Structures are given as C-alpha cells and as structure tokens.
Image (cartoon, rainbow, N blue to C red):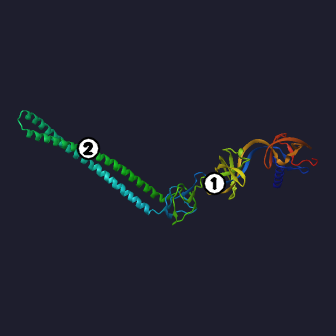
Amino acid sequence: MMACVIVLMTVLWIWQPWKAAPKKTRNGPATARVSLENVVHTILATGKVMPQVGAEVNVGARISGRLDKLYVNVGDTVGKGQIIAEIEKEDLEATTAEKEAEVALVEARLEALKREGPQEIAQKEAELAERKAKLEFVRCKLGRDDQLLKKALISNEDWEETSSDFKAAQAQYEVAQRKLQLANTNFDEGLKQLAAELRRTRASLKNALVKLSYAAIHAPLSGVVGSVSTREGETVAAGLSAPTFVTIVDLKRLQLDAYVDEVDIGRVKVGQKGFFSVDAFPGKEFHGRVTAIYPQAVIQNDVVTYDCIISIDTPYDGLLRPQMTATVTIMVANKENVLVLPVGAVKHRAGQNVVWRRKGDRIEEVSVTTGWQDDTRVEVLSGLSEGEVVLLSPPTDFK
C-alpha cells in the first residue's frame, strides 16, 4: 500500500507543470506556458560601503607640542567625550597659574577700591561740611561787622581782619569742594579702569584655560579607532588646520554609495528600494532605499557614473565595514500581472517579433508585441493570452 502511494505522488509531481518553465514532451519540442507574473525592473551597479556624513571624524591637535600620552590603538572602541590622547602641558599649566594670579591681584585691588573709595569720599564730604559751616559763620560775622563799621563801633582794622577771615574760609571751602569732586572722579575712574583690567585679565585666563583644555584630546563621537598616525613622544604642530593623528568611525552609521552608469541614472529616483551583497557575506542581502543622488559625475577609467546614496535598513552591526565593495540592485519599477515568456521563445522575423503557438496538434506562427525583458523573461503586450503554450524553438521547417 505504501509503495502505491509513493508511486502516485511521484506521478502527480511529474505531471504538474511550472508556469513559464520550459517543458519538453516525449515526442515534441520543448514548450513554455504563457503566465501572469509580477515583474520588477532593476538596474545593476557596483558600490562601496561608506560612513555617513559626520560618522567618520579625523581627530587632531589644536595646539603644538609633544604627544605625551596616547590612550588608544587601531580597533579600539571609544565613547564620545573619552580622552584619547594628551599633549604635554607643563608650560600651559604655568601660564594658567600666572593668569590666575593676575586676575586675583586685580580683583583684590578692585575690592580695596570699593572699600576705601567710599571712605575717602565720606571723609571729603565731612571736610566740606566743616568748611561750609566755618564759611557761613564768617559770612555772618562779616555782615555784622559791616553794620558795626557803618556805626563806627569797630575799627577798620577789625573789619579788614574779618573780611580776610571770610576770604580765607571761602577759599578753604572751594578747596574742599574740589577735593570731594576729585575723590568722586578718582573713585569712578578707578572702578572703570580696574573693571576693564579685570575683563582683560579674565579673558587672558580664559584663553589660557582653553589652551590647557586642548592638551587633553577627546573623542568627538562614539565609534571605533580606524587609524593612528602619531605616536607618543612625537611633536604635533597646530596650523591653519589641525593635524590629524587619529581617525574614529561610527560603524553604526554606514551607508552604501552605489555608482550607477550614466545610461541608467535617469531611471533612479529617491525612495526606490535597493539591495546589495558584499564579498565577505555572499549569502547575505542588505536592503535599503535611495536617499540621495549626487549631481556631480564620478569618472573612473573614462566611465561616467553617478553616486546614489542608499540607506541600510537591514541590521548590519558587526558585519559591514567601510570600503567594502558591493554588488547593488536598485528596483526602479515594478509591474503586476504581466504576461511573460522565456526570452528564447520570441524570434525576430520579417521585421516583427513572432512565436509559435501550439493549439492541439497544430503549430501556428503568431505575431506578438513585446515590452520589458531581462536575461530570462520577456513581457508580452499583445498576441497571446495566459495559459497558451508556445514552442521554445522554431519548428524544423522554419526558414
């Protein structure tokens, strides 16, 4: 009983055809059945796995000096803000200490002025009040002596003495006024000068602290150290551009740069799906979408291509590396329910495309209109219907 079941299953499997697959009868040529399929128009390109913009950073020194400590090697994983190297900083620390002392001195002078200035002004105000009181007293005495002199109750000598005292008191009052004014002016000007000096010294200190901070070189992003070009003990010289001695790459932020031939670039649009494989993992497909098409051509060996950026949606952590070469497929269009045939079934005859359709025991030549095709299939726009059977090779009497 089991043997019968096995034989029956085998017969059924052999009898069931594959839609568009070539079929060869026992006594006739190979045939294929016209089938409805969903087809995708694709273009092929080569590409490279590259870091995204900002995912690869060249780290350098912003000050000149001897590299004192290097804490990383190629392949090390670093975190954002981690100290990866230090430049000798003894001179910078000495300069910073000097600037701190200058700031402290100016701050002390400013505090002393704020404390002593008002005291001096108060003293000058008291002296002025005293001189004013004496002036008023002598002024009253002189007025009284004027009346007494008119009545001949005092001598001219007494009046002249009082008048002289008034002039002296008035002069002393004016001197006290000028001293108070000078004290206020000196206080205000002193505050302005010391405030300006304090700003200057603080700016110098800030500059010294910034330079001191440059002695410690931090990782600007998390990633993996890709290269190290300077060793401990070597001197780095800061110029218009910071000298690079460490490169860090964020391997979690990669993209694919697909180089599409100029013949195909017109069919590529942002948003189209794509997939690629790399030699390191030939059985693994990575999927993504076109996110940008660079307008500037890339010319290599006189071949014009355009750089199309493809995001990578497939998880790739630990698999992909920068500069990996990739074989890329971009899906530029798709059609549903398309009549297709094996491309070899269509022949060109007398200026038109023809196939040989089998109807029962008869073979007839049929003119067809074709559309899209790839290496194995061709789209049939007119002339055939789904399910019809055609020959894969012309009849023996075809001329």
Residue 270 picture location, percent across and down: 66, 44
Residue occupying the point 29% across, 47% down: 187
User: Which class describes the residues within 10 Å of circle 2: few (<14), some (14-19), or many (20+)?
Assistant: some
Q: Residue furthest bottom?
A: 233
Which of the two discs, 1 and 2, labels the residue nearer the N terminus? 1
Q: Quadrant of residue 334?
A: top right
Q: Secondary structure at mark 2?
A: helix
Residue occupying the point 31% across, 46% down: 188
Q: Quadrant of residue 361?
A: top right
Residue 322 picture location, percent across and down: 63, 56
Quarter of the picture containing the N terminus is bottom right
Q: Residue furthest right?
A: 397
In front of the other: 220 or 271: 220
User: Which class describes the residues within 10 Å of circle 1: few (<14), some (14-19), or many (20+)?
Assistant: many
Q: Which disc is residue 50 wearing?
A: 1
Residue 276 picture location, percent across and down: 69, 52
Q: Is residue 16 visible?
A: no
Residue occupying the point 41% across, 60% down: 95
In front of the other: 83 or 343: 83
User: In the image, is 178 to the left or to the right of 214?
Assistant: left
In front of the other: 149 or 387: 149
Q: What amino acid is labelled 1 in the image?
A: Met
Q: Residue furthest front?
A: 156
Q: What amino acid is labelled 2 in the image?
A: Gln
Q: Which residue is mark 2?
A: 181
Residue occupying the point 41% across, 54% down: 204
Q: Nearer the viewer, mark 1 or mark 2?
A: 2
Label 1 – label 2 distance at C-alpha: 74 Å
Q: Which disc is residue 6 wearing?
A: none
